[in-house]
Amino acid sequence: MKVEGTALPGVLLIEPKVFGDRRGYFFEAWNAERYREAGVDVAFVQDNLSFSERGVLRGLHCQHPHAQGKLVQVLDGEVFDVVVDIRRGSPTFGKSFCTYLSSENRCQLYVPAGFAHGFCVTSARALFSYKCTDLYHPASEFTVLWNDPDLGIDWPAAEPSLSDKDLKGIRLRDLPSTRLPVFEVP
């Protein structure tokens, strides 16, 4: 597998080794030993699937406390995936990394705990998978406003379909600092 660092330290773009022939293909979507060697040394405790239609935007979500690291990938379709560093004291605070994940490129993205995450569906529909390092904890979840002008994210949908929760997102600068995770030097 090929692992690339991104502009956000700890956020990794992973391209698994794919074995294909006329019948289809096979690849390892998770192998604890191999991923540990690549820098993803975490224990996953929950797997989630999300199905959405074109133009659906989910995010930017985070939990603190009970932060979740995530290994995300698209099983069918394509999404524009976004990660934002929201860790207090981080040298990349407020910076984002964006990429397209699809069933065609088969890439995965590792999002460490302490980052906000979201995606927008760019294909007719998408089946999105994510492994999480902590259980879903609704009381500690919050949403950073998807179109926060301070973040400057160039989403591929001007008027995305949003949940009520995502419509009520808060600008990063308006979140109380106690709600944000703290940057820890690795």
Image (tube, helix red, strand yellow):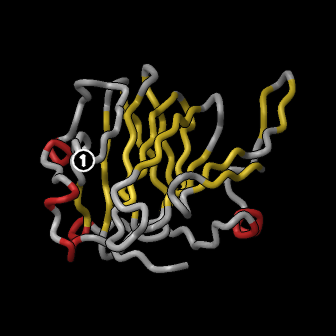
When the figure is inspected, residue 36 is found, relative to residue 127, above or below; the finding is below
Q: Is residue 183 above or below residue 152?
A: below
Please tell me which residue is depicted at 79% across the width and 44% down the height of the picture: 17
Tell me which residue sits at (45%, 53%) in the image: 48
User: Residue 34's spot in the image, x, y percent?
Assistant: 77, 63
Which amino acid type is marked by label 1? Answer: Asp
Left or right of residue 112, residue 179 in this image: left
**75 to the left or right of 143:** right
Crowd tier of the residue under label 1, counting other residues whose Cα lies within 10 Å: few below 14, some 14–19, many 20 or above: few
The residue lying furthest to the right in this view is 21
In this rendered view, identify the residue nearer to me: 172 or 56: 172
SS label for mark 1 = loop
Out of 98 and 49, give the one closest to the viewer.
Answer: 98
**Is 50 positioned to the left or the right of 27 in the image?**
left
At a point 40% along the width and 75% down the height, the residue shown is 183
Quarter the C terminus occupies = bottom right
Query: x and y percent of residue 109 in the render?
Result: 56, 50
Q: Quadrant of residue 30?
A: bottom right
Tell me the residue that label 1 is attached to.
150
Residue 104 picture location, percent across and down:
64, 28
| Residue 138 versus residue 119 in the image, above or below | below
